[in-house]
Amino acid sequence: MEHHFILSLYNPNENTMKSILTIISALIMTSAVHAQNRVVYGKLTAYNTFPVMNVEISSKKAKATTMSDSLGNFALVCLEKDVIQIKSKVFQPVNQKVSMEDTDTLSINLIFIDTKRNQEIAVNSGYMTETNLNYAITHLEEENTDYCKYTDIYMLLRAEGSGIQVSNSGVITIRGGNTSFSGMDQALIVVDGQPTTNIDWILPCMVRSVDILKDSDAAIYGSRGGNGVVVITLTHRQKVP
């Protein structure tokens, strides 16, 4: 009897083996799913200035949900190639892709749909304080921009930059400047006060404003501004490559 018991331990029947394999497979699949999860941190603002509170944020693939806090901050569980979704009656909807390689806090500027009714909802729901909302509507209209709808910085410049021309190779010129093909007709690009030749890294949602300077307005940049200047201001100051 003792010998038979030892054999049964080392020779499990078919049903037992199937159960063990099922458990192992489930553990492997669970580990794989958790390995793809990450917490994405972000901040919601309106008019690129004021925090937006008590707004629901969800992840499309992970199906997680959270709320922005009193500073507009949030933390959300996402899967690989997930999409952050924000739906509110008073703000334009947001569908923003997230990269699993991104480690910085996402800055999402919500576009307020300015109506009398929406002003009441925004204040009563605690999205914004009445003082901040009234100031923003009166003084910060130019900050209520929907740059996130563009897929890259060059598309944004083509659409929002008055007089800007962008070639297929990414060369930016301003109408009225030189028309040579030597490359000397390229406009000066200034990002957060720093001249640069590379703006590929700028995401549309990072942009606060785009200003075009020509003639006397560009004179402060000397000869470098002779072909015009494209001044890009970001929502949060970052190190320009």
Image (cartoon, rainbow, N blue to C red):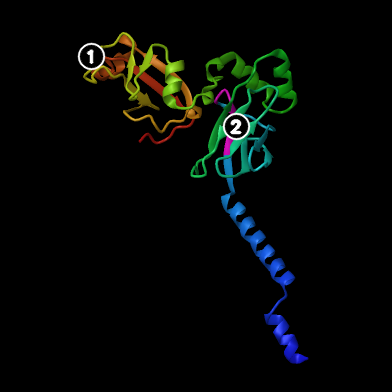
N-term mark: 1 or 2: 2
Say what amino acid the circle numbered 2 marks.
Answer: Leu
Can you give x and y, in whole percent of width and height, for residue 74 in the image?
Answer: 62, 39
Q: Which residue is mark 2?
A: 44
Q: Could you tell me which residue is drawn at 53 percent across and 26 percent down?
A: 148
Q: Quadrant of residue 158?
A: top left
Q: Is residue 68 visible?
A: no
Q: Quadrant of residue 57?
A: top right
- Mark 2 element type: strand
Tag 1 secondary structure: loop
Disc 1 marks a residue whose amino acid type is Ser
User: Is 45 colored magenta in this rendering?
Assistant: yes
Residue that label 1 marks: 180
Residue 114 on the magenta segment:
no
**Which residue is painted at 57% across and 32% down in the image?**
96
* 226 on left or right of 164: left
Indicate the position of residue 214 as horizontal and vertical percent values.
33, 11
Residue 87 shows in this picture? yes
Q: Residues within 10 Å of mark 1 (few under 14, many from 20)?
A: few
Question: x, y (%) of residue 134?
Answer: 64, 17
Residue stretch rendered in magenta on the structure:
42-48
At x 68% / y 25%, what residue is drawn? 129
Across and down, in percent, residue 23 comes to 69, 64
Label 1 to label 2: alpha-carbon separation: 44 Å
